[in-house]
Image (cartoon, rainbow, N blue to C red):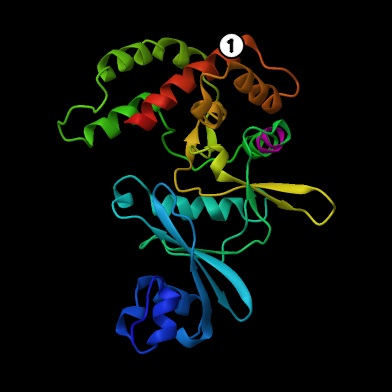
Amino acid sequence: DAFHVNTYEDLRQLDFANEQLENDATITIQKCFGVTLKDIDDFLPLKNGLTNRSLRFTVNGQKYIIRIPGEGTENYINRVREGKIYEMLRGKGICTDLTYFDAVKGFKITPYIDNVRPCDETNPEDVRRCMTIARKFHDLKLSLGGEPLDIFNTIQHFEDLWEGKESGFADYNETKKHCMAMKKYVEKHHREAVLSHQDCTPDNFILYPDGKGGEKAEFIDWECGCDADPLLDVASFVSYRKNDRNYIEMAIDAYFPEGCSDEDRLLIYCYISLWGLYISV
């Protein structure tokens, strides 16, 4: 007989004694919940992110997600800092509290939430909800301490990881020159650094029913979090639609219901350009 094995669960159903079923992820789950492999059900791979993979599973009738760190992420993700951020946010209503975190291997376990959807960046109400929780988070004025992020140094750091190789973009040097020309304005007008998400894209917001007829918005994926100018988060949210002026203005107005100053607005536009360069690097 022939069997088509396409997922972990397929293999488990076919050959439970297969030694390949034991791996770092399943061992972590067993350790977290004090169970054996037979007590874990319904393994389901979820959509891969830019840097990691995720797997849904069930233990004692409850669904969870385990984040499996991508190869090479140890070069630019500080897992100890990530774990500290989750502890700082515990109970603040910004993100779901963790069930388990391993700062050495990078595994993270959180409860699985039903009826979740990502932010629809074309929906003004979604944008408003996301910018509102971003502002709520920034206004907490949390801090990890130490040196805050400098976007210019960060761009250079990632360029150094190329180890002497040239950019894949023909106009990289010219574009970088234009972006670096913004440094004087940014250094003059930047805001006080607070704990920021630093990957504040629409994909990293989720919305789900709040039990009161509305929806609750949350931040997810805090692995890039650090102290920085909070307006960098606003810029990263709109950076993938940087040619849509109306969209950018809508997001800025949602973040600043009291009104945005001309200096802050121009600073956000500077950060949009710098964020685009950072992501390309």
* Outermost residue to the bottom: 17
Q: Residues within 10 Å of mark 1 (few under 14, many from 20)?
A: few
- Along the line of sight, which residue is nearer the eye, 233 or 123? 123
How many numbered marks appear?
Answer: 1
**Residue where numbered disc 1 is placed:** 263
Q: Looking at the picture, does residue 189 appear above or below residue 228?
A: above
Q: Position of residue 68 (x, y in %)?
A: 41, 61
Tell whether 15 sits left or right of 266: left
Q: Position of residue 25 (x, y in %)?
A: 40, 70
Tell me the quadrant of the picture where the C terminus can be found: top left
Amino acid type indicated by mark 1: Glu
Is residue 265 within the magenta segment? no
Tell whether 74 sits left or right of 118: left
Magenta region: which residues? 126-130
Q: Looking at the picture, does residue 84 appear above or below residue 257?
A: below
Most frequent secondary structure within the magenta stretch: helix
